[in-house]
Image (cartoon, rainbow, N blue to C red):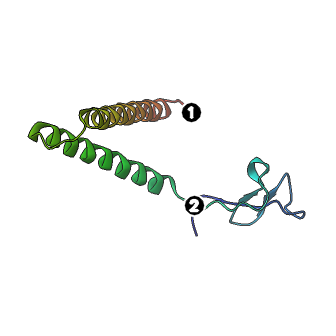
Amino acid sequence: MPLVPGIGAAAPSAGLGGISGLGGSEWQIDGIGGVAGAEAPAKSFGSMLGDQLGALDKLQNTAAEASQALADGTATDATTAVMAVERAKLSMQMAAQLRTKGVEALNDIFHTTV
């Protein structure tokens, strides 16, 4: 059973405010965003983070290949190589900023007095 609640279509007997499963061990929120009948796959935070890190790795590899082709003289278009490198650079900067913000948030939680 996944830890992330599933998102389903709105049901007339959904319970309190569209939340079904109250009193049970599983929560499900129905009809998010007014999209009736749209089923979104339930993915965990870890799997989404892994997918995004894989995409970042792919961008880094593409940029490395494009810059290598540019250095070898086999690149047909220099602007494509420069765009790939800049795209990878910006993606890495964003990932670093997200990591920094996540660490700061975690430190704030740890330093909270109870």
Q: Position of residue 1 (x, y in %)?
A: 58, 70
1 lies left or right of 14: left
Q: 65 or 72: which is nearer to us?
A: 72
Q: CA distance from mark 1 to mark 2?
A: 26 Å
Q: Secondary structure at mark 2?
A: loop
Q: How many marks?
A: 2
Q: Position of residue 22 (x, y in %)?
A: 78, 61
Q: 81 or 1: which is nearer to us?
A: 81
Amino acid at pointer 1: Val
The residue sitting at 16% across, 38% down in the picture is 70
Q: 95 or 70: which is nearer to us?
A: 70
Amino acid at pointer 2: Leu
Where on the picture, by quarter, is residue 77? top left
Which mark, residue 3? 2
| Label 2: few (<14), some (14–19) or many (≥20) C-alpha neighbours in 10 Å | few
For the C terminus, the image quarter is top right
Q: 111 or 105: which is nearer to us?
A: 105
114 lies left or right of 103: right
Q: Position of residue 45 (x, y in %)?
A: 50, 52
The residue sitting at 54% across, 59% down in the picture is 43
The residue sitting at 41% across, 48% down in the picture is 52
Q: Marks 1 and 2: CB-CB under 8 Å?
A: no
The residue that disc 1 covers is 114
| Label 1: few (<14), some (14–19) or many (≥20) C-alpha neighbours in 10 Å | few
